[in-house]
Amino acid sequence: MLLPATLAGQAATWLHPNTRIGIFGTDTISIFGDMVNEGNILSTSGSVVNFFGLRWRNSNNAVIRDESSDGFSATGGLFRFTQPDPALYQHITGGFSAVMNTGASFPNLSVETSPGIILDDLSDLKVVNVLDIRKGYVFLNGWNLVVGHHTPGEILHYSPERFIVTAGGFLYRRQIAASSGTVVFPVGTRPASFTPAAIANKGTMADFRVGVTDSAYQNLTTGPNLLLTSVNKTWQVDVSQPDAAINLWLVHGFGDEGPVYEANRNTSYLARYLPSGWDIAAQRAAPLSPSIFSTTGPDHQAAYGVRTFQHLAATNYFTSLVAETVNSPERTTLQYFEATRSNTNADSVQLRWITGREYFCAGFTVERKYAGINNFDSIGFVKSSSPGGISYFPVGYASTDYQPNDKFIFYRLKVSMTDGSFFYGPVRLVKGKNERGDITVWPNPVRGRVVHIYYGAGVHVKAIALLDVPGRRILTKEYRQPLPTRNYYELDIPSYLARGIYFLQFLDENGQTIHTEKIVLME
């Protein structure tokens, strides 16, 4: 019995128990509804099944095999899980048991739906030869994915945007031998956290499985969380053969590094949990970056450590720690701060800032001063929104200051920690309510010897020249771009200049004049 070339409609296709069908090398079929397989499918090399439905369910007694005598030794056909955009999640009940090593298995499976596929409850999934992750993720949903049979199989096209999300489940790779080389387990705990492991087996051929969780506790599952001195990940690596020896690579994102880890990363190492606790390696070094464990090229937002381990138990746990904590971490990093007149209400100044990392941060005092005033005044306090004042990810804040006047206003942030220490962020200058233009000079007329030049976000001034009326250049001052601490320039006027009219000439990176401003020197 052969499935027809196209199974149209959205009704489920049901392959009854004891029913046998064959999909041969020249066959390409499409299934548009859900699929229930309780029978026996022969999937020969070169055949293709395009599955557009939402759910594929293999029963516990279902069979999918290739044309070889044992059903697992040929290339076999391809099962493509795909949907047109806007695509929906596709669900699979694999009908396989990783613990019992029995049940149905797909010869080759390609994930081509942008959200990804989800393993349904109470069933694992097995792919004999090739798992190709072309779009989206494979969500294990706490269950297990087995790749390989006589060999570890292949996993293709994995990257930080396409990988296996474990969520409590495991990725198995079968029959890893010394000749298999480095075998990658492209796993992560959630779509934004790609933390693969890679294993090179140095001993007897064995099956391996890898899972990863978002924590690293002092006593493995109890005690303090080592989130300050670790990458806040624990990888579980299980092996079917006792006393195994491996080279192990573990990848983490820079955002996973705790602040103490980051400050002492030159002493990092892969740690193994022993009955006595986390071990300490004799050799330590900074994690290597970029990560090479992505099929789309180096990942410059990730790093990895490597270590050789001997005498593995059946179940093993690993993380990445630092051996020394002599360097203090930065308390908090202020990644971004801006102050601008509102586009919808010119009477208001909008303040926005982002912390790159918070380490016992109490909050932020917003300080303001008007042009001509020496000291900043506090106008409000914004409490840290991070639990306990600790965050390893960027956190955004916003505030509004009502300022319906024409004065230039300076703003800055005082960033305070829970121990009373603090630091100041960069100063931002805001124009008066009715000032126009991307470049504004203040004060003008000039009284004193310092001129402030406000510039808009789109302006890139490399140098400012001061000219007299005949056009002679009196001085030129160059500025590094972009200015890291403020959105305005300061220009010192030479004390020997007489009163009168002068011109400020603004030059771009090519030395071309982009703006000229007349100033009047009063004293």
Image (spheres, grey):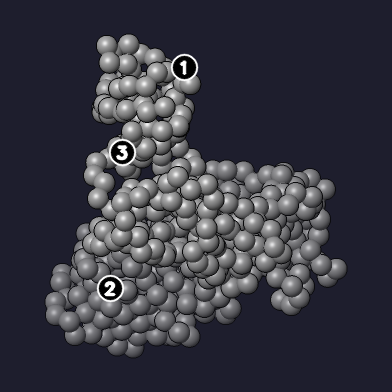
Disc sitting over residue 88 in the figure? 2
Q: Are marks 3 and 2 in contact (CB under 8 Å)?
A: no
Q: Mark yes or no: residue 481 visible.
A: no
- Give the structural element (helix, strand or loop) at label 1: loop
Does residue 368 sit above or below 283 in this rendering? Answer: below
- Give the structural element (helix, strand or loop) at label 3: strand
**Mark 3 lies on residue:** 440
Which residue lies most toward the bottom here?
17
Relative depth, front residue between 442 and 514: 442
For badge 2, the amino acid type reads Leu
- Give the structural element (helix, strand or loop) at label 2: loop
* Residue at image coords 30%, 37%: 439
Disc sitting over residue 48 in the figure? none
Which residue lies most toward the right here?
276
Tell me where residue 56 appears, x and y as whole percent. 32, 79
**Mark 1 lies on residue:** 496
Count every numbered label the image shows and give the total: 3
Relative depth, front residue between 415 and 59: 415
**Which sits earlier in the primary sequence, circle 3 or circle 2?**
2
Dot 1: within a 10 Å radius of its alpha carbon, few (fewer than 14), some, or many (20 or more) residues? Answer: few
Structural distance between the alpha carbons of marks 3 and 2: 52 Å
Tell me where residue 485 appears, x and y as whole percent. 49, 42
**Which sits earlier in the primary sequence, circle 1 or circle 3?**
3
